[in-house]
Image (cartoon, coloured by chain):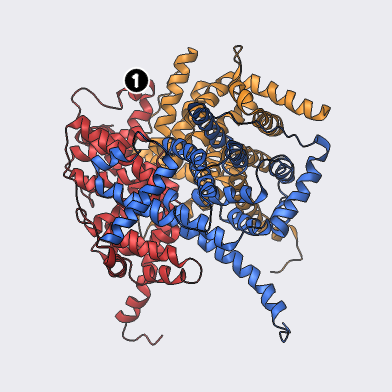
Chain colours: A blue, B orange, C red
Amino acid sequence: MSQERSRYERGRNVLSEIENDPGGSVLDDLAAFCPDLERLAVEFCYADVLDRPGLSRPERQLATVAALAALGNAPSQLRFHIRGALNVGCAPEHIIESLIQLTVYAGFPAALNAVSAARDVFADQGVVPTPTHHQTDALSRFDTGSTLLERIDGTGGTAVINSLADIAPDLGRFIVEYSFGDVYARPGLSLRLRELVTVAACTALGTCAPQLRIHMQGYLNVDGTTGELIEIIIQMAVYAGFPAALNALTQLRAVLAEQEVPSAVAGSPGCRG
Amino acid sequence: MSQERSRYERGRNVLSEIENDPGGSVLDDLAAFCPDLERLAVEFCYADVLDRPGLSRPERQLATVAALAALGNAPSQLRFHIRGALNVGCAPEHIIESLIQLTVYAGFPAALNAVSAARDVFADQGVVPTPTHHQTDALSRFDTGSTLLERIDGTGGTAVINSLADIAPDLGRFIVEYSFGDVYARPGLSLRLRELVTVAACTALGTCAPQLRIHMQGYLNVDGTTGELIEIIIQMAVYAGFPAALNALTQLRAVLAEQEVPSAVAGSPGCRG
Amino acid sequence: MSQERSRYERGRNVLSEIENDPGGSVLDDLAAFCPDLERLAVEFCYADVLDRPGLSRPERQLATVAALAALGNAPSQLRFHIRGALNVGCAPEHIIESLIQLTVYAGFPAALNAVSAARDVFADQGVVPTPTHHQTDALSRFDTGSTLLERIDGTGGTAVINSLADIAPDLGRFIVEYSFGDVYARPGLSLRLRELVTVAACTALGTCAPQLRIHMQGYLNVDGTTGELIEIIIQMAVYAGFPAALNALTQLRAVLAEQEVPSAVAGSPGCRG
């Protein structure tokens, strides 16, 4: 029992750190109504998953906020985890930039509703973010976007744009100009964190397998590691269920397999294939 | 800067037309809190996308209402765009019929919640829709539905029903009787607009690839054009994110490829394949 | 007309039984605003689908509650059907256990919000559930989970865990320890009903095809029947749309095809394949 005791206690400590509410925990009502579920949530979500190494506490909160914002169907948890992000040291500007990033992957209504939630939480907490002002020059949006697309998504991203040329070239142009030229070009959030937020949201949504593959590769291209990707995915089991995590791992396996083919060839001098 | 100025101004004009609120814009609060995101939303959503030719303003609003109703997770945007649909000249009966159509593709809870939203918006705006009364005769529901299914979805639709014969024939019967015999048979919305609403909702949901293919072909079968389908899909990037639009384009490409095979054969007399 | 009359009347009777509200029906407002949709909802949802044999009324309500809880975007319908579940004789403990089960398949936010809804409904109705207290011993969580995983999901479940060994073994361990060792091991809901809830939720979500296949086979492994699976799927057309039901049937057909291969071989002595 002491091992369980320690899982529960460790989980409550993580929850307290995220929650930072001396008046009590959001789970107290649940503990009164359904104590077993409260225990399972503390042990599994907070001790087993959120306390894992491999991502910092602020990075984990950004991933959670991205997932809940993209799903759009748990507004009170979204507010709780935005507040939690502030409590563990996320800059408010990082939260806002993460939500601007989500306009691309979850659409404007989901992103705008999450920005409203952030505005309310910031006001409650007396947090005044410094608004980031950035505007890509109109004439260079396409070039700026093309450069960033190739830097981040490599050949996978360019292939998507090229594949649109015969059917919907304007959508391709919007991806370059808006997604990369306007959004990815913004300061205030590193490319790695932009991809972290993207991978978390696409994993939670569960409807973007091709894009998830491209952005997992993108995460690796901007100095992220495979181990961090696995941590993001495992964390999504908590917020979107195990199937979402398992299906994302299937995509990650495909990404890693594609990387291994050329490296295997390069690494085996006797290979003539 | 003047090109950007004009994108922003053009976007604000489109937004004003949809919003029609002399007291201010729904985006004013956002402009105060996060001015860059307000600018991006106006430029990209309203200037780049909603102001495109190829679909009328009322058709675009019906597509947006369908997407938001199907997703079910952005109720304030749903009400905003229902009001916007009225403002750009949609008949209230078109809105209601679009939502009845969605019972088939997004389920009754999503459709009923959107009808409630429409009822509230209509009451606010003093709009009194003329209720459509239509009831397919009980004895002819199956025949009426079969005829419409073949007219709209062609061999693809019949293939779905036949494929159910050995495993769930009653579900096949419900599709014929309810979806086509009851719903598609209703007056008050053209078959093309019913398919427009269906394609928009299935694109936004992102979970209906096989059905999306069938109804893209269906849209073409009832006098819609490929160009209009591409416009619906591009518009969904705004409301459900770029991955939703990209995945729908993949399905459209498959639909167009299927059409090309026979026409290529028919058009090349020397072909003996 | 009399056949239609009887579909409508039969549907209203089913609705009354679920609703049990002498003061009127939740559909009365809809009947005033959009009478055709009220009629279609009563005839199709309540007469055609919910009145079908093959699953009991309480089982059907658990499937509906699971689907609405997992989707998370129709909170008033979720409360309505939780109350309906009580009205048709579901034990409140069955409802709570179904929602604990959903932590695994739809994530904690969706499950916790549904538990909050249940708490409100129970309080309104004066229902006081007997909390189930169960805690799998810390040292036996893995073994308990492994045994249950093999019992329920058979080789399919074990294959999933094994496939994680090289990429995310801790996620595999969490599935064994948390999903099976903690959740499936709980008393208070039979394994068949746990799988019924799982199949309903995964069908409604539409993003879990591989897991849906495994748990359809799981449903059959714990004494469920193919006919019951088909009933769950047909019912999901009401709550998540026909595409969700059709796509789940595609998965079921794959499950049944896999079973037929060995049984065909076993059953045809002349076969030498």
Q: Where does the image place residue B134, in percent across and percent down from the top left?
A: 40, 27
Which residue is identified by label 1? Answer: C32
Mark 1 surroundings within 10 Å by alpha-carbon count, few (fewer than 14), some (14 through 19), many (20 or more): few
Q: Give the left or right position of residue C125, taking residue C182 as reference.
A: left
Left or right, residue B162 beside residue B14:
left
In the rendering, at what x and y percent does residue A178 appear?
Answer: 71, 40
Say above or below: B104 vs C39. Answer: below
In percent of width and height, residue C157 lies at 37, 67
Q: Chain of mark 1?
A: C
Q: Between A203 and B233, which is closer to the camera in this rendering?
A: A203
The image quadrant where one finds the C terminus of chain B is bottom right
What is the x, y in percent for residue C18? 22, 36
Residue occupying the point 71% across, 45% down: A180
Q: Is residue C10 visible?
A: no
* Location of residue C215 (image quadrant): bottom left
Q: Quadrant of residue B163?
A: bottom left
Q: Residue at x 38, y 39 (%)?
A: B141
In the image: residue B4, left or right of residue A50: right
Q: Is residue A27 above or below residue C37?
A: below
Asked if one can make out residue C173 in the rendered structure from this viewpoint, the answer is: yes
The total number of labels drawn is 1
Of C189 and C39, nearer the camera is: C189
**What residue lies at 70% left-to-right and 26% top-to-bottom?**
B11
Where is the N terminus of chain B found, in terms of image quarters? top right
User: Is A107 or C2 nearer to us in this picture?
Assistant: A107
Which residue corresponds to the image point at 37% horizontal and 39% vertical from the top-left?
Answer: B140
Report which quarter residue A5 is drawn in: bottom left
Q: For the residue labelled by badge 1, is the local secondary structure a helix, a strand or a loop?
A: helix
The amino acid at mark 1 is: Ala
Judge whether B155 appears above or below A226 on screen. above
